[in-house]
Amino acid sequence: MDSNCFLRPAVDADSEALFEICLKTADGGNDASAFYSDPHLPGYIWSVPYLKFAKDFAFVLVLDGRPVGYVVGVPDTARFDRDLEANWWPLVRRQIAGLTPARPRDADVIERIHAPRSGTPWLQDDYPAHLHINILPGLQASGWGRRMINTELEALKKHGVSAVHLGVDPKNERARGFYRHLGFSELEQDGAVAFAMRIDDRSGQSAS
């Protein structure tokens, strides 16, 4: 692991960094800048709202003073979705008002902002928490991913969370291998790929 890296709790000033990291990893871990007209679009969904509404579970990986990765999560997915509907999506809808889809993934994200949906509702009863992690290309496979996931799981566990899940791009084989290696169980339904784990017993046992 790079000795110049360290992990710290995220702060409000990290918002732009979270937008940038999300954009530059949104194509299966690679740069998705060419797919979005507005560079904030992916971060509106997959990174910044976690900093705004679940800051106790948001951490950034810093290299030479610059955030280069993040891990974020929420202990209660259903409650988080309600918070966003009341306090986040109305603001974002005003931010993107008038934006016309012009690049390949604009329409999908705009539709998600206007009609939010969870990619893994079938897991929320058994695994109520969820998380996201992204690290800029070049630092992936550096050993920090495991440390970041462990930090997030410990924060969730201290909050009383018993089980967690996350969604994965089905095409991202490297990520799928990473989560399997960490002891997550891989689950699929209707073409969606997710990983899940019980964290009330972190003794190396994966979710069943």
Image (tube, rainbow, N blue to C red):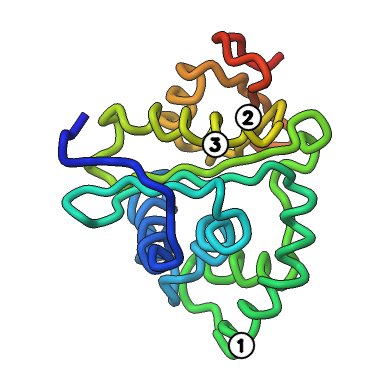
Question: Mark 3: which amino acid?
Answer: Pro
Label 3, on which residue?
170
Q: Position of residue 180 (x, y in %)?
A: 51, 19
Q: Position of residue 118 (x, y in %)?
A: 72, 51
Above or below, comparing residue 5 to residue 46 in the picture: above
Q: CA distance from mark 3 to mark 2?
A: 27 Å
Query: How many neighbours does mark 3 have within 10 angstroms: few (below 14), some (14-19), or many (20 or more)?
Result: some
**Closer to us: 128 or 55:** 55
Instruction: Tell me the SS state at disc 1.
Output: loop
| Tag count | 3
- Residue at the spot 78% in from the left edge and 38% down from the top edge: 124
Label 1, on which residue?
97
Q: CA distance from mark 3 to mark 1?
A: 31 Å
Q: Position of residue 133 (x, y in %)?
A: 46, 42
Task: Tell me the tag on residue 157.
Answer: 2
Residue at the bottom extreme? 98
